Image: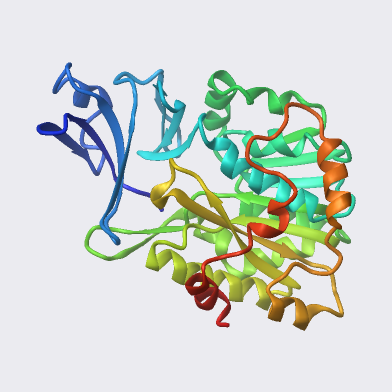
Amino acid sequence: MLLRRIFLASTFFSCDILVIGEDTCSASSAAATTSSVPFVVKEEEDEIGYHMSLVADPIPIHSSQSAYQKIEMYQSEPYGKILILDDCIQLTERDASHYNEMMAHVGVMAHPNPKRVLVIGGGDGYVVHEVLKHTSIERVDHVELDREVIDVSRRYLPWGSAWDDDRVHLHIADGADFVRRRGSLESGSYYDVIIQDSSDPFYEDSAGGMVVLPSSVLYTEEHFGNVRRLLGEDGAFVVQAETYNVPSSLDAIKSWHELLLNVGFESAKYGTIAIPSYPTGQIGFFLCTKMESKARSSSRAQNVLPEYAAPEIALQSRFEAMDGEETFYYHPRLQQSCFDLPLWVEKRIYGA
């Protein structure tokens, strides 16, 4: 969700609070309220009365306004660098591996021999960085709307050299438009894996109203259908899918599941990720597979991946053959276990 950010300078018994809900003032002015107490970046989910905060240095190491959004980078002793877009925490160095490794490796490992990958969004570059660890990859098309996010990430984040790899082709473009245009140009399937690391398509404001955001075009039946048409027979699609701990998000997760199946994906399973710096400490994704299979009805009923998914031994072998530094969060057993959900969540999403 796009969340309101609060800069909070506090002790356990007294505090000076400055709420920045509509870009009314800058972060530095919040720091000026006090010099003796911690500077904290705080987010809240009004829908469930949830608040969280991260300690950070008071002066950003980067602050700019692009054509699309405000971009800030803070340094934090516990969390490393913190990337914030339009007052919303995008990632921290400490736990960015949790989300980005799962977004990259679950989809790539679901394909028996991935060569071409499309990454939509993810301007920080971490998903691209992880995809490149797979030695079979020959080409990565990365589509990002805001070049300035990429420039800031190149400068400050440790994986910022990902775009220097010759296999990476960067496209500064709208993701939905790119998929639509590429689909009209290609006579057949083009990508083995498509990963959509998009921003949130909506949020619920403090009055309980639903605010639809520009990225909502990436969560429509038309877009999901266009994505499917760009995938090869064994193709896999991974899409960011919010947290199940917020009722409006869980409603959306259920709706997206239905849309993904309606456009023809053989399977659409919600995977979960534990990540402390995200609201409620949990976020998820859908892994969607295209392959036509005799196991269609049984795989859905049993809540498992399609039968063609690589055996555990093959997954382990591919995992050990990956280039670069080892992963921190992802390992092959998560290829299946991440889809094991609390019973109430499974019932809500799948109707079982």
Q: Between 238 and 186, which is closer to the camera in this rendering?
A: 238
Q: Between 42 and 213, which is closer to the camera in this rendering?
A: 42
Question: Is residue 271 positioned above or below 317 on the image?
Answer: below
Residue at 71 percent of width and 64 percent of height: 288
Q: In the image, 29: left or right of 63?
A: left
Residue at 43 percent of width and 56 percent of height: 213
Q: In the image, 165: left or right of 78?
A: right
Q: Where is residue 109 in the image (x, y as percent from the top left)?
A: 79, 50
Colour scheme of this structure image? rainbow
Which quadrant would residue 87 be assigned to in this image? top left
Residue at 86 percent of width and 58 percent of height: 311
Q: Position of residue 176 (x, y in %)?
A: 62, 55
The C terminus - image quarter: bottom right
Question: Is residue 147 positioned above or below 255 on the image?
Answer: above
Q: In the image, 106: left or right of 196?
A: right
Question: Is residue 240 positioned above or below 246 on the image?
Answer: above
Q: Between 178 and 14, which is closer to the camera in this rendering?
A: 14
Which quadrant would residue 284 be assigned to in this image? bottom right
- Is residue 77 visible in the rendered image? The answer is yes
